[in-house]
Image (cartoon, rainbow, N blue to C red):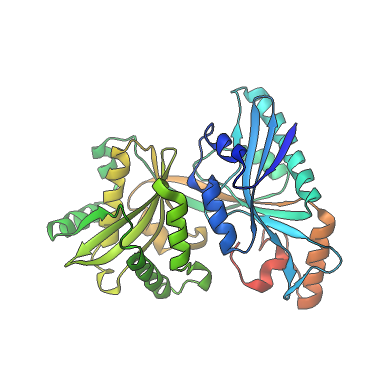
């Protein structure tokens, strides 16, 4: 069994992705952008055995508690997924009877490699649309069911897609279009700064945590790195952009990534018109699925209800929490408990527990 710990510039990273169905979250350019935002190191683990391959992108971060490195362990780290759904990927020759054994061996090898790098734990987001054996994953860590996400099957006929749309949405979309609401794709990203304004205003409106404010520099870097995989759509009225959204396209999967709507347009159904337009654009380009995601924190909230107006299809979003070096993990957890006087809780709660004091999203 061959185990490689890859950096974004290593040719094996893109070479593997060329052979395997994946999403933009797995691409080295995206992991690199996210690693800079999180002050970490972009990495990917690639494990090969014969025709089988296991792949997982991660961000390694130093363990810092109360502003200091973990005492007693030099260069102690943990790992987490980039923002989104960058699940493990499996490439196999189609022999189900051997695939389970390979995955077990690969997970054991991953834990050994991570521990050798003093990476004590990993928080991994699974992809709602890309399958993996969750029973085996749960044998090597805590698998948490966070909630459902919503997706659109773009292989359906246009009439079937329209029938899946909530009747009130159909009326509102048609009415808004008759009043002149038109959406276009901004091929040159000329309005990216306007998108950031609308996005920030929307995050303020919903009282989102500061973590969700990425900034213009981040989005500019995302555009430069992702290239053709990233698309900016705009809804304009009287020469002003009142609604804008970022949508990704990779391996036949289109993702509704982020969007923003101006305060004066929030009750005009413009976001519905945008999602409807992107749906037809994505289908016309031959994509198979349009993933809308779920509610905030995977809850069935108002955002979830809004997205569910476009499709009846659901997939489950899981997170996977794995401990690779029990000694370092326990040392960090005990130190956090000592400083805060609070119990850490189990792995199904906030993970890893010693990150709680930073009030960061993992």
Q: Residue at x 58, y 45 (%)?
A: 87
Q: Is residue 29 left or right of residue 259?
A: right
In the displayed structure, would residue 157 be above or below residue 291? above
102 and 300: which one is in front?
102
Q: Residue at x 49, y 51 (%)?
A: 148
In the displayed structure, would residue 291 be above or below residue 105? below
Q: Is residue 94 left or right of residue 291?
A: right
189 and 138: which one is in front?
189
259 and 174: which one is in front?
259
How far across and how far down the image is residue 263, in percent?
30, 74
Can residue 302 be spotted in the picture? Answer: yes
How far across and how far down the image is residue 89, in percent?
59, 38
Q: Residue at x 61, y 61 (%)?
A: 362
Furthest-right residue in view?
72
In the displayed structure, would residue 5 be above or below residue 201? above
Q: Residue at x 73, y 69 (%)?
A: 64
């Amino acid at each position: 069994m061959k185990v490689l710990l890859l950096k974004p510039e290593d040719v094996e990273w893109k070479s593997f992705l060329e052979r395997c169905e994946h999403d933009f979250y797995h691409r080295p350019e995206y992991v690199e952008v996210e690693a800079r935002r999180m002050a970490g190191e972009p990495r990917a683990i690639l494990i090969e055995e014969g025709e089988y391959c296991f792949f997982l992108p991660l961000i390694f971060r130093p363990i810092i508690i109360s502003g200091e490195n973990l005492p007693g362990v030099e260069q102690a780290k943990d790992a987490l997924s980039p923002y989104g759904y960058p699940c493990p990927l499996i490439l196999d020759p189609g022999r189900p009877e051997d695939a389970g054994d390979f995955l077990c061996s690969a997970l054991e090898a991953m834990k050994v490699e991570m521990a050798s790098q003093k990476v004590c734990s990993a928080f991994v987001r699974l992809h709602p649309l890309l399958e993996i054996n969750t029973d085996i994953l749960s044998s090597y860590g805590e698998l948490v069911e966070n909630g459902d996400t919503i997706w659109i099957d773009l292989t359906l006929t246009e009439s079937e897609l329209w029938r899946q749309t909530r009747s009130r949405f159909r009326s509102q979309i048609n009415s808004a279009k008759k009043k002149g609401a038109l959406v276009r794709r901004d091929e040159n990203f000329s309005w990216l700064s306007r998108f950031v304004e609308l996005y920030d205003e929307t995050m303020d409106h919903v009282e989102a945590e500061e973590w969700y404010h990425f900034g213009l520099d981040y989005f500019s870097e995302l555009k430069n790195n992702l290239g053709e995989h990233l698309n900016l759509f705009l809804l304009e009225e009287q020469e002003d952009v009142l609604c804008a959204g970022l949508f990704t396209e990779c391996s036949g999967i289109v993702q509704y990534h982020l969007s923003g709507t101006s305060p004066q347009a929030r009750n005009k159904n413009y976001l519905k018109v945008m999602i409807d337009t992107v749906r037809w654009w994505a289908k016309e380009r031959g994509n198979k699925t349009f993933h809308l995601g779920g509610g905030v924190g995977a809850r069935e909230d108002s955002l979830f209800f809004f997205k569910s107006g476009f499709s009846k299809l659901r997939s489950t979003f899981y997170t996977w929490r794995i401990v690779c070096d029990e000694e370092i993990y326990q040392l960090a957890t005990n130190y956090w408990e000592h400083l805060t006087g609070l119990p850490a809780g189990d792995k199904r709660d906030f993970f890893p527990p010693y990150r709680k004091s930073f009030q960061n999203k993992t």
